[in-house]
Image (cartoon, helix red, strand yellow):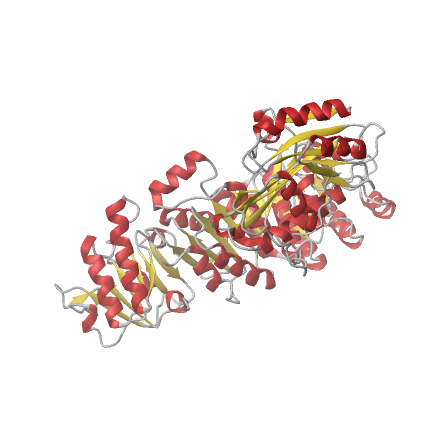
Amino acid sequence: MTLRAALAPRSIAVVGASDNPHKVGGRPILYMKRYGFKGAIYPINPGRAEVQGLKAYASIADTPEAPELAVIAVAGDEAVRAVDECAAKGVKVAVVMTSGFGEIGAAGKAAQERMAASARAAGMRLVGPNCQGLANFATGAVANFSTIFHEMEARDGPVAIVSQSGACSQAIYILARQRGLDVRHVHATGNEADVTVADLAEEIVQEEGVRLVLLYMEAIQRPQVLARAAELARARDLPIVAVKAGRTASGVKAASSHTGSLASEDRVIDAFFAQHAIWRAADPQDLVSAGQLYLSGGRPKGKRFVAVSNSGASCVMAADAAEELGLDLPELAATPQSRLQQVLPAFATAANPLDVTGALLNNSGLFGSAMTILGEEDACDLLMLAIPIAGAGYDVPLFARDAAAFRERFAKSIAVAAPQEDIRAAFEKLGVPAFARERDAMLALHQLAAHSALLRRAPAQALAQAAPALPAGKTGFLDEFESLALLARAGIAVVEHRLCMDEAAARDAFRALGPTVAVKACSSSVPHKTEQGLVRLGVQSEADVAKAFGDFKPRLPQGDGVLVARQVAGRRELALGAKVDPLFGPVVMVGDGGIYLEALKDFRLLLPPFSRQDVLAALAGLRMAPLLGALRGQPPLDVGAYADMAVQLGDAVLGWGEQVASVDVNPVMVFEQGSGALAVDALVELAPACAKPG
């Protein structure tokens, strides 16, 4: 059912309405009157004829119509009964502010589920319980009891905030307002017995007036809904920035006690957000830090960064920070250098970062002249104007006008860094984002550029071909021979190998695959062979192959054999893996491989479908990334071949769906560029549901 009635109801009832405007049941009425709600308000209080000047009703059943939205601000069992009464009346959305449900244990969870079941049976949506409520300042529908809307006057604007946590929704609101951002939506979903952050986000991103969405989540119960919301937002070039708490084991435990939520592996969240162009922030401060930049102009087409300052120290520190953040710090071309040299003092150098020197005190037009040249020559995508000191003698209003003109004329992203509050205020008055710290300004510019690139990227499409059929009648692990065969049918290059059932076959395999081979037990009952001493590497004679076969075969179940494979030496051992996450579906791991994979954990996760470029970008973020390129006279590695293997694996696991529980390909030998990559060892685990013909 649509949630428009949650955001723009035509009538609202308040169950547990209070004449005291500062109680939970009183504040929503106070706020609706203050913020101009035009619909009908029905206070529900059997002990009063009137509440805050409005006619009161003994029960929801007595209201002259079915209110579209009902606020429930009564305790315990009364809240459960109120939900039942709202459902019977035909209310579309109930906002349950009452605590003491899923967040306190088994009994509370059972009561919460009864409440949700009652709402579901009637087709009524339920927000909460244990939530602070909803607030839409475009319509005045403020079904929320937060103090902050009394302390800090709200103004309708382009920002929407949706949070599981009520307190966090208010913290984000405060920080946004302090940065000059006006906010339309402030919603808190609490225990999410029904309506989640994702549900409200999907509705909100369709509003034309919303230009920035900020989310706080402790669990993502409906990733498919959040994915739909993100794709709707991407189509509108609408940025979504999100905090997903519960990154660590301690955070997960705290989240469970806070809202009764469960958390997925954190790297899966990173992969999901990247796939759907959601920028992940660390905390509420990080969530709003780039807000002005998102709203102040267009999207940068690249990350070419130029710093302009009246301080050499600021220029040096900007160069350091640019390298750390991965911003491009291009050398200026000959033409802009020449033009800049004509306006700068003779002792200044026309280089990036650009120091206009202390001459700014005598020539207030230096900033404006420099920015105009940089804009006309298209020398940058991002510009930081760093002003570590200004005041008497400096024409700060002119600096601000020049910065605003640069942004408007050239559609460039600009941020100002100035420690003095009054200096920042002059720029912010003209809509130019300003920061106290230069590093904060650069972080925000970096975020804008990187997020803009995500929003521009077209979602990858899976290959049209069907995933290869799985072995019929199998459950659990496939043996290595079956695993390699399955990957080969998926288009992944695998090492040459033979399955041998007797010594003669093992000797033949050596003659065909030598001079050096690997000999391994091949049994689905022994998935981890190395730990059992059932792998021998570097075997270089028929006699040694025969001995290994003779040692291994008696230790295996009847009907299992021994694998003899050509032993290859790549320039680098990488790994591929896949699993099915219970919430997010198939996930593919790309990264460093070999025996230290689990210890070093130098890998990234991707959600299929993804592209070759997505894999290459993931590899570039690894600690070992420098080892993949040209090194000490050696040619670069064929990471493109490895990336193609990853795409093929991603498409295959997407096609297999829940029939395959996991895939482990380690190592993948990667050779020099142009020579490809080979899967050397593989282990596929089928899900129990796959015990049927493939």
The residue located at (44%, 44%) in the rendering is 263
Horizontal and vertical percent position of residue 369: 76, 49
The residue located at (38%, 37%) in the rendering is 253
Screen quadrant of the N terminus: bottom left
Q: How many marks?
A: 0
Horizontal and vertical percent position of residue 210: 51, 62
Which quadrant of the structure image shows residue 666?
A: top right
- Tell me if residue 9 can be seen: yes
Horizontal and vertical percent position of residue 196: 41, 56
285 horizontally vs 9: left or right: right
294 horizontally vs 625: left or right: left
Horizontal and vertical percent position of residue 636: 80, 36
- Tell me if residue 311 can be seen: no
Q: Which residue of the protein is positioned furthest toward the bottom in this rendering?
A: 64
Q: In the depicted view, which residue is nearer to us: 503 or 552?
A: 503
Screen quadrant of the C terminus: bottom right
In the depicted structure, whether residue 327 falls above or below residue 2: above
In the depicted structure, whether residue 502 falls above or below residue 102: above
Q: In the depicted view, which residue is nearer to us: 277 or 550?
A: 550
580 horizontally vs 124: left or right: right
The residue located at (30%, 48%) in the rendering is 102
